[in-house]
Amino acid sequence: MNGNDCRFLRACRREQVDCTPVWFMRQAGRYLPEYRKVREKHTLLEICADPELAKEVTLQPIRRFDLDAAIIFADILLPLKCFGVEFDFVAGEGPRIFHPVRGAQDLERLGVGNPKQDLSFVFEAIRLVRDALDSKVALIGFAGAPFTVASYVIEGSYSRNFLQTKLLMYKHPEVWRALMEIISEVTLRYLKAQIEAGAQAIQLFDSWVGCLQPDDYLNYVLPYSRGIFESLKQYNIPLIHFGTGTATFLELMQEAGGTVMSVDWRLDLDQVWQRLGDNVAVQGNLDPVALFGDSIELEKKVDMILDQARGRPGHIFNLGHGFLPQTPIENVEKIVQWVHQKSKN
Ligand code: CP3
C-alpha cells in the first residue's frame, strides 16, 4: 500500500474507506504500564529530547491496539525553548513556566530562535517512527495553537479562568499581538520542519480556546491560527484543527482553517456537519470519562457517535480530549474493535 492511501489519510480527505479510522489523543501516556516504566527512569522532557525514547513511546500504543494513526511523542510546550521561555513539568502539577510574560518589558527577552536546530530531536524522532511504522498507520505531527501556547506563556501554568491571558489581550493588545506573532512564526517553522521530516498530517491543538467569547476569538486569535493554516496549505496534507468547548464559535474556527475539525463531546457530530457543511472531515468526539463507566454505556456512546457520522465520508473516531491517566486499558481495546467492526462497509 502507498503510505498516503491508508485509512486515516483517506478519511481525512473524505475519500471512501473500508471502515472508520480510529486513534486517540494522549494514546501514549500514563494509562499504559509500559509508558510508566519508561517514566520511572526518564523525565517527560528527557523522553522528548531523545529520539529513540520518543520513538519507543510513540509506538507503544500502536503495538497494543489496532490504531490507524500514531502521533509523535512531544509536547506543545517544546517550542518555548526557541523563544527563550524556560519551563519544566512539575510532578502532580503540570507545566510550570519560570518567568511568565506579563508586559512589554518581558517581550524584549523573546526571539524566534531557530526551531529547525533547537528542536532537531523532534524531527529525528519523526524520521525514526516513520521508518518503523507499517504503511497502514499514518504519522501525525502537532503543535499547540498560538492561543493555547500563549496562555501557558502568560499564566505560567494551567489556569482556571485565564485572567492574565485575557488581561493582556484587553489592556495591552499591542503586547498580545507581538507575542502571538512570535509564537505563530515559531509554530509555523516547527510544523513545516515536521512535515519535511515525514509527518503525514498535522494537528493544531487549541485546547483552551473555549474560554473565549466568539468576538474575542475573531479579533485576538483567528488571524494567527489562520496564518499558520494558510502557510501549510502548500503541503496538501490533512490539517486537523482541535479545540474543546468550541460550540459557540465553531464556524469561526473553521474560517481560521483546517481540513478536519476536531470537536469534543459537548457537540453532536451530526450538528457539527449541519453547521459546517459536508465539505469538511470531522474528528471526535467521545468523552474520555466514558471509558471509566460500564461497558454497556460505553458501547452506547460509541454507537451514537458512529450513527451520527453514518453515511458521511470523513469521520475520524477519536476522543473529545485526551485520555486520563487512570483510563482502563481493556476499554480502549474494546472501542478500537467496536469502531472498526461496527463501521465496516
Ligand atoms: O500520545 C500523545 O498524545 C502524544 C504526546 C503528547 C503529549 N502532550 C505528551 C505529554 C501530546 C499530543 C501533548 C499535547 C499537549 N501538551 C497539550 C494539548 C492536548 C491537550 O491535552 O489539550 C497540552 C495542553 C499540553 C501541555 C501539557 N503537557 C500539560 C497540561 C501536561 C500535564 C498534564 C498531565 O496530564 O499531567 C503535560 C504533560 C504531558 N505531555 C504528559 C504527556 C504524555 C503527561 C505524562 C507525563 O508526565 O509523563
Image: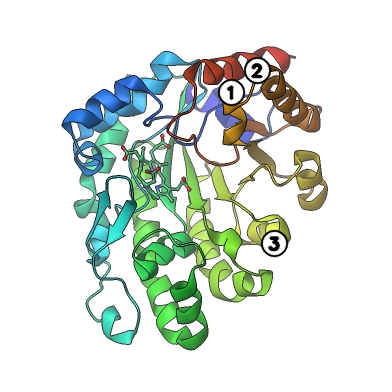
Q: Nearer the viewer, mark 3 or mark 2?
A: 2
Please report the residue visible at 52 percent of the width from the left and 62 percent of the height from the top: 225
Q: Secondary structure at mark 2?
A: helix
Task: State the mark number for residue 7.
Answer: 1
Quadrant position of residue 110? bottom left
Compute the Cα span from label 3 to label 2: 33 Å
Q: Nearer the viewer, residue 180 or 65?
A: 65
As measured in the structure, the alpha-carbon distance from the residue carrying label 1 to the one carrying label 2 is 27 Å
Which amino acid type corresponds to the residue marked 2 in the rendered image?
A: Ser
Q: Secondary structure at mark 3?
A: helix
Left/right placement of residue 219 relative to residue 175 reads: right
* Number of numbered labels in the structure image: 3
Q: Residues within 10 Å of mark 2 (few under 14, many from 20)?
A: some
Q: Ligand 1 closer than 8 Å to the CB at disc 2?
A: no
Quarter of the image for residue 103 reads bottom left
Q: Which mark is residue 249?
A: 3
Which secondary structure, mark 1? Answer: helix
Left or right: residue 44 versus residue 31 is left
| Name of the residue lying farthest toward the left | 41
Amino acid tagged 3: Phe
* 95 horizontally vs 263: left or right: left
Q: Are marks 3 and 2 in contact (CB under 8 Å)?
A: no
Which sits in the foreground, 266 or 189? 266
Location of residue 282 in the rendering, given as x and y in whole percent from the top left corner: 67, 40
Closer to us: mark 3 or mark 1? 3
Q: Quadrant of the C terminus?
A: top right
Q: Which residue is mark 2?
A: 295
Q: Residues within 10 Å of mark 1 (few under 14, many from 20)?
A: many
Q: Is residue 341 above or below residue 159?
A: above
Q: Quadrant of ligand 1?
A: top left
